[in-house]
Amino acid sequence: MTIGITGQASAFENDVAAYLQELPKLLGTNEGKFALIGHAHLEGVHDSQEQAMREGYSLFGLGGFLVQKIAQSDLDMAVHWHQACQS
Amino acid sequence: MPVLTFSKSQLGPILEVSVWPGTEAANQLRHAGKDVPQPSQLMMLVDSGSEGSVIDESLIRPWNTPYVSSAWAATIAGRKPVQQYEVALSIRGQPGQPAWNIPSLLVSARQSPFTGMPYLGLIGRDILDRAVFVFNGPAHHCTLAY
Protein backbone atom coordinates (compact mmCIF):
# COMPACT_ATOMS: atom_id res chain seq x y z
CA MET A 1 0.00 0.00 0.00
CA THR A 2 1.27 3.48 -0.83
CA ILE A 3 0.38 5.96 1.87
CA GLY A 4 0.12 9.53 0.75
CA ILE A 5 -2.06 12.11 -0.83
CA THR A 6 -2.91 12.96 -4.39
CA GLY A 7 -2.76 16.41 -5.96
CA GLN A 8 -0.97 19.42 -4.47
CA ALA A 9 0.44 18.47 -1.07
CA SER A 10 1.99 20.81 1.49
CA ALA A 11 5.48 20.26 2.86
CA PHE A 12 3.86 19.11 6.10
CA GLU A 13 1.68 16.55 4.33
CA ASN A 14 4.70 15.30 2.39
CA ASP A 15 6.65 14.91 5.64
CA VAL A 16 3.79 12.97 7.22
CA ALA A 17 3.50 10.76 4.14
CA ALA A 18 7.28 10.11 4.22
CA TYR A 19 7.09 9.11 7.90
CA LEU A 20 4.16 6.79 7.27
CA GLN A 21 5.92 5.19 4.30
CA GLU A 22 8.92 4.38 6.52
CA LEU A 23 6.86 3.34 9.51
CA PRO A 24 6.39 -0.39 8.74
CA LYS A 25 10.17 -0.82 8.51
CA LEU A 26 10.85 1.36 11.56
CA LEU A 27 8.42 -0.59 13.73
CA GLY A 28 10.50 -3.73 13.32
CA THR A 29 13.60 -2.41 15.05
CA ASN A 30 12.92 1.05 16.44
CA GLU A 31 9.47 1.07 18.05
CA GLY A 32 9.36 3.61 20.88
CA LYS A 33 12.26 5.63 19.49
CA PHE A 34 11.92 8.98 17.71
CA ALA A 35 12.11 9.43 13.95
CA LEU A 36 13.25 12.74 12.48
CA ILE A 37 11.76 13.61 9.09
CA GLY A 38 12.41 16.70 6.98
CA HIS A 39 12.08 17.55 3.31
CA ALA A 40 9.96 14.40 2.99
CA HIS A 41 12.92 12.24 3.96
CA LEU A 42 13.79 10.16 7.03
CA GLU A 43 16.89 11.85 8.48
CA GLY A 44 17.47 9.49 11.36
CA VAL A 45 16.22 7.74 14.48
CA HIS A 46 16.99 8.99 18.00
CA ASP A 47 16.60 7.50 21.44
CA SER A 48 14.95 10.60 22.92
CA GLN A 49 12.57 13.29 21.72
CA GLU A 50 14.95 15.99 22.97
CA GLN A 51 17.81 14.59 20.89
CA ALA A 52 15.65 14.42 17.78
CA MET A 53 14.32 17.95 18.31
CA ARG A 54 17.84 19.35 18.70
CA GLU A 55 18.90 17.65 15.49
CA GLY A 56 15.75 18.83 13.71
CA TYR A 57 16.31 22.47 14.62
CA SER A 58 19.98 22.12 13.72
CA LEU A 59 19.23 20.69 10.26
CA PHE A 60 16.09 22.60 9.33
CA GLY A 61 16.07 25.77 11.44
CA LEU A 62 12.82 27.58 10.85
CA GLY A 63 11.78 25.13 8.13
CA GLY A 64 9.31 22.53 9.30
CA PHE A 65 10.27 19.02 10.35
CA LEU A 66 8.71 16.12 12.20
CA VAL A 67 9.83 14.33 15.32
CA GLN A 68 7.57 11.30 15.65
CA LYS A 69 7.52 8.62 18.30
CA ILE A 70 7.58 5.37 16.32
CA ALA A 71 4.29 3.69 17.16
CA GLN A 72 1.97 1.08 15.69
CA SER A 73 -0.99 3.35 16.43
CA ASP A 74 0.24 5.78 13.73
CA LEU A 75 0.04 3.01 11.17
CA ASP A 76 -3.54 2.23 12.19
CA MET A 77 -4.48 5.92 11.89
CA ALA A 78 -2.70 6.15 8.54
CA VAL A 79 -4.94 3.54 7.00
CA HIS A 80 -8.01 5.63 7.87
CA TRP A 81 -6.33 8.80 6.58
CA HIS A 82 -5.38 7.06 3.34
CA GLN A 83 -8.96 5.90 2.83
CA ALA A 84 -10.27 9.43 3.51
CA CYS A 85 -7.77 10.90 1.00
CA GLN A 86 -8.91 8.47 -1.68
CA SER A 87 -12.63 9.15 -1.22
CA MET B 1 3.39 21.76 45.56
CA PRO B 2 2.10 25.13 44.24
CA VAL B 3 -1.65 25.29 43.71
CA LEU B 4 -3.69 27.31 41.21
CA THR B 5 -7.32 27.96 42.14
CA PHE B 6 -9.93 29.09 39.64
CA SER B 7 -13.69 29.29 39.33
CA LYS B 8 -15.69 26.71 37.42
CA SER B 9 -17.62 28.41 34.60
CA GLN B 10 -20.84 27.27 32.93
CA LEU B 11 -18.67 25.63 30.27
CA GLY B 12 -16.34 23.90 32.69
CA PRO B 13 -12.87 24.55 34.03
CA ILE B 14 -11.40 27.44 32.02
CA LEU B 15 -8.03 29.00 32.80
CA GLU B 16 -6.12 32.12 31.74
CA VAL B 17 -2.95 31.25 29.90
CA SER B 18 -0.15 33.15 28.16
CA VAL B 19 1.51 31.47 25.22
CA TRP B 20 4.64 32.28 23.18
CA PRO B 21 7.28 30.34 21.23
CA GLY B 22 8.99 27.60 23.22
CA THR B 23 12.63 27.83 24.26
CA GLU B 24 14.28 26.37 21.17
CA ALA B 25 11.76 27.85 18.72
CA ALA B 26 12.53 31.27 20.20
CA ASN B 27 16.27 30.60 19.88
CA GLN B 28 15.79 29.80 16.21
CA LEU B 29 13.94 33.08 15.66
CA ARG B 30 16.76 35.03 17.36
CA HIS B 31 19.35 33.12 15.35
CA ALA B 32 17.54 34.16 12.15
CA GLY B 33 17.50 37.80 13.29
CA LYS B 34 13.76 37.82 13.87
CA ASP B 35 11.88 39.19 16.85
CA VAL B 36 10.45 36.75 19.35
CA PRO B 37 6.69 37.43 19.60
CA GLN B 38 5.29 38.78 22.82
CA PRO B 39 3.08 36.41 24.83
CA SER B 40 -0.53 36.11 23.67
CA GLN B 41 -3.26 35.83 26.28
CA LEU B 42 -6.01 33.27 25.85
CA MET B 43 -8.43 31.13 27.78
CA MET B 44 -7.98 27.35 27.74
CA LEU B 45 -10.42 24.64 28.77
CA VAL B 46 -9.10 21.84 30.96
CA ASP B 47 -10.02 18.70 29.00
CA SER B 48 -9.01 15.37 30.48
CA GLY B 49 -10.49 13.70 27.39
CA SER B 50 -7.87 15.25 25.15
CA GLU B 51 -4.59 13.34 24.89
CA GLY B 52 -2.63 16.46 24.04
CA SER B 53 -3.03 20.19 24.39
CA VAL B 54 -4.48 22.17 21.49
CA ILE B 55 -4.34 25.84 20.49
CA ASP B 56 -6.14 27.69 17.70
CA GLU B 57 -3.60 27.99 14.90
CA SER B 58 -4.46 31.66 14.33
CA LEU B 59 -2.41 32.39 17.46
CA ILE B 60 0.61 30.33 16.42
CA ARG B 61 0.92 30.77 12.64
CA PRO B 62 1.95 34.47 12.79
CA TRP B 63 5.04 33.51 14.83
CA ASN B 64 6.62 31.82 11.77
CA THR B 65 8.11 29.10 13.92
CA PRO B 66 8.41 25.64 12.36
CA TYR B 67 6.08 22.71 12.87
CA VAL B 68 8.08 20.07 14.73
CA SER B 69 5.73 17.12 14.91
CA SER B 70 2.29 15.90 13.92
CA ALA B 71 -0.65 14.46 15.83
CA TRP B 72 -3.95 12.91 14.76
CA ALA B 73 -7.06 15.02 15.10
CA ALA B 74 -10.67 13.96 14.71
CA THR B 75 -12.56 15.83 11.99
CA ILE B 76 -15.90 15.37 10.24
CA ALA B 77 -14.06 13.51 7.48
CA GLY B 78 -12.26 11.23 9.92
CA ARG B 79 -8.85 11.48 11.52
CA LYS B 80 -6.18 13.58 9.87
CA PRO B 81 -2.69 14.74 10.80
CA VAL B 82 -2.30 18.25 12.23
CA GLN B 83 0.83 20.27 12.88
CA GLN B 84 2.40 20.52 16.30
CA TYR B 85 4.49 23.45 17.45
CA GLU B 86 6.85 24.03 20.36
CA VAL B 87 5.32 26.61 22.68
CA ALA B 88 5.88 28.03 26.15
CA LEU B 89 2.92 28.40 28.47
CA SER B 90 2.22 30.33 31.62
CA ILE B 91 -0.93 29.11 33.36
CA ARG B 92 -2.50 31.50 35.86
CA GLY B 93 -4.93 31.02 38.73
CA GLN B 94 -6.27 33.67 41.03
CA PRO B 95 -4.33 36.93 41.55
CA GLY B 96 -1.39 36.44 43.87
CA GLN B 97 -0.90 32.79 43.05
CA PRO B 98 2.37 31.91 41.29
CA ALA B 99 1.88 31.08 37.62
CA TRP B 100 2.77 27.61 36.34
CA ASN B 101 5.41 28.19 33.70
CA ILE B 102 6.11 25.48 31.11
CA PRO B 103 9.02 26.58 28.89
CA SER B 104 8.65 23.94 26.19
CA LEU B 105 5.65 21.85 25.18
CA LEU B 106 4.41 20.44 21.88
CA VAL B 107 0.82 21.48 21.17
CA SER B 108 -1.44 20.74 18.22
CA ALA B 109 -2.56 23.67 16.09
CA ARG B 110 -6.14 23.45 14.85
CA GLN B 111 -7.99 25.75 12.47
CA SER B 112 -10.85 27.52 14.30
CA PRO B 113 -11.69 24.48 16.42
CA PHE B 114 -13.64 26.32 19.10
CA THR B 115 -15.95 28.63 17.15
CA GLY B 116 -18.40 30.35 19.45
CA MET B 117 -16.58 29.28 22.60
CA PRO B 118 -14.84 31.64 25.01
CA TYR B 119 -11.62 29.63 24.89
CA LEU B 120 -9.00 29.17 22.17
CA GLY B 121 -7.23 26.10 23.49
CA LEU B 122 -7.44 22.86 25.42
CA ILE B 123 -5.23 21.80 28.31
CA GLY B 124 -4.87 18.08 27.68
CA ARG B 125 -3.43 15.10 29.49
CA ASP B 126 0.12 16.00 28.44
CA ILE B 127 -0.13 18.82 31.01
CA LEU B 128 -2.53 17.14 33.44
CA ASP B 129 -0.16 14.17 33.71
CA ARG B 130 2.22 16.52 35.56
CA ALA B 131 -0.40 17.82 38.00
CA VAL B 132 -3.21 17.03 40.42
CA PHE B 133 -6.46 18.46 39.08
CA VAL B 134 -9.50 18.72 41.36
CA PHE B 135 -12.92 19.59 39.94
CA ASN B 136 -15.07 20.61 42.90
CA GLY B 137 -18.54 20.83 41.39
CA PRO B 138 -20.59 21.72 44.48
CA ALA B 139 -18.16 24.49 45.45
CA HIS B 140 -17.93 25.76 41.83
CA HIS B 141 -14.17 25.86 41.84
CA CYS B 142 -11.18 23.87 40.58
CA THR B 143 -7.60 23.49 41.68
CA LEU B 144 -4.52 22.54 39.75
CA ALA B 145 -1.52 21.56 41.85
CA TYR B 146 1.79 21.15 40.05
Image (spheres, coloured by chain):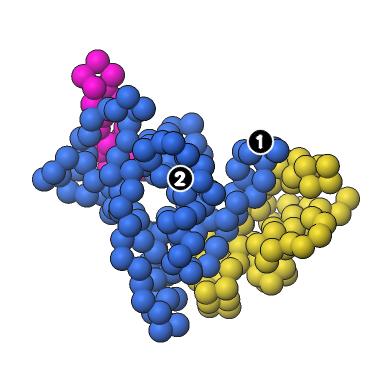
Q: Within 10 Å of the Cα at label 1, are there few (<14), some (14-19), or many (20+) other Cα atoms?
A: few
Q: What residue type is labelled 1?
A: Ile
Tell me what hue chain B is rendered in. blue
Q: In the image, is residue B143 part of the stretch drawn in magenta?
A: yes
Q: In the drawing, what numbered circle is on residue B53?
A: 2
| Left or right, residue A42 beside residue B65 | right
| Left or right, residue B105 beside residue B74 | left
Which residue, given by chain and number where applicable, does mark 1 sit on? B76
Q: Could you tell me residue B133's position as x and y percent?
A: 32, 32
Q: Distance between the residues labelled 2 and 1?
A: 20 Å
Q: Determine contact: label 2, label 1, CB under 8 Å.
A: no
Residue range of the region highlighted in magenta in the rendering? B129-146
Q: Is mark 2 on a helix, strand or loop?
A: loop
Q: In which quarter of the image is residue A38?
A: bottom right
Q: In the image, is residue A80 part of the stretch drawn in magenta?
A: no
| B33, above or below B66, in the image | below
Observer able to see residue A79: no
Q: Within 10 Å of the Cα at label 2, are there few (<14), some (14-19), or many (20+) other Cα atoms?
A: many
Q: What residue type is labelled 2?
A: Ser
Q: Residue at coordinates 31% horizontally, 65% vertically from top-left?
A: B38
Marks 2 and 1, the one that precedes in the sequence: 2
Chain bearing mark 1:
B
| Left or right, residue A52 beside residue B23 | right
Q: Residue at coordinates 24% horizontally, 15% vertically from top-left?
A: B138
Tell me what hue chain A is rendered in. yellow
Q: Could you tell me residue A28's position as x and y percent?
A: 76, 53
Q: Could you tell me residue A35's position as x and y percent?
A: 64, 62
Outermost residue, top side: B138
Q: In which quarter of the image is the N terminus of chain B?
A: top left
| A84, above or below B7, in the image | below
